[in-house]
Image (cartoon, rainbow, N blue to C red):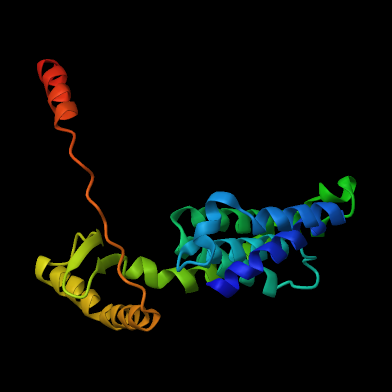
Amino acid sequence: FIVLAACVPALTAHLAWRFSGQVWAARLAGLLALFSGYYLAYMGATEVFPIYMVAGSLFLLLAFEQPDKHKVAQPLLLGLLAGLLHLSRADGLLWLAAALAVGGWLAWRRSGHGEAFAWQAAARQAAARQAAERMALTLAAYAVVMSPWYVRNLIVAGTKTAVVMVEGGAEFVSEADMIDAVFFGHQAMQPMIDMQIEMKREVGKPKRQMQPPVRDEEMESKVIETATPVI
């Protein structure tokens, strides 16, 4: 994750240079990515933000490559990146729509040589065929990444000794099978929990002690006194 985070400023600067052609814009974009304010705390952590930023930057760079050079590779890679972005965050599904739009637009632009030719029937048919081919490749690549997620869409979070959160649902699976799946997930996370415990032991940093907030009884009584009649 630290390596991914280190790539973000360079990719951002390169994107700015590709789109603007201005060195000062590339430097400014790289500096803004390096000192990104709110997101800076997440950049080196085991979070989805570095993955999302790197994959999104690569997506934008690839989307504007010349389609003649990458007739098959470009839509496939766009689909794979869209799948990775969706796997990272729920709003990553928007990248799939962008990938499909890019495929249609590039195919249409490539089929014509001026407005007069672009509106001819043969040009429209060629553009539609190429757009369909590119979109099919993009969807196939996206499905390779996301199909396992759709098939087994169950999230289990837990600690060494307990399950603390479950996200998911089922209409055809029995309750017993669902419970077995939850505990299977809990067992599967044990090696990762053991790794975290071992990392904590090697670092030697003591666990942070949380001080519970002091209860303001006077404020609590005033809230109760004011709100109770209204409720």
Residue 107 in view, yes or no: no
Residue situated in front as seen by the camera: 97 or 123 = 97
Determine which quarter of the picture holds residue 149: bottom left
Identify which residue is drawn at 14% across, 16% down: 230
Q: Quadrant of the C terminus?
A: top left
The percent position of residue 194, horizontal first and vertical second, equals 29, 82
Residue situated in front as seen by the camera: 53 or 120 = 53
The percent position of residue 68, horizontal first and vertical second, equals 80, 69
Identify which residue is drawn at 12% across, 25% down: 221
Left or right: 73 as drawn, with respect to 137: right
Residue situated in front as seen by the camera: 209 or 27 = 209
Vertical comparison of 26 with 183: above or below:
above
Vertical comparison of 121 with 68: above or below:
above
The percent position of residue 3, horizontal first and vertical second, equals 59, 74
The percent position of residue 201, horizontal first and vertical second, equals 33, 82
Residue sitting farthest toward the top = 229
Left or right: 176 as drawn, with respect to 63: left
Q: How many marks?
A: 0
Residue 179 in view, yes or no: yes
Left or right: 26 as drawn, with respect to 135: right
Identify which residue is drawn at 79% across, 56% down: 26
Left or right: 126 as drawn, with respect to 49: right
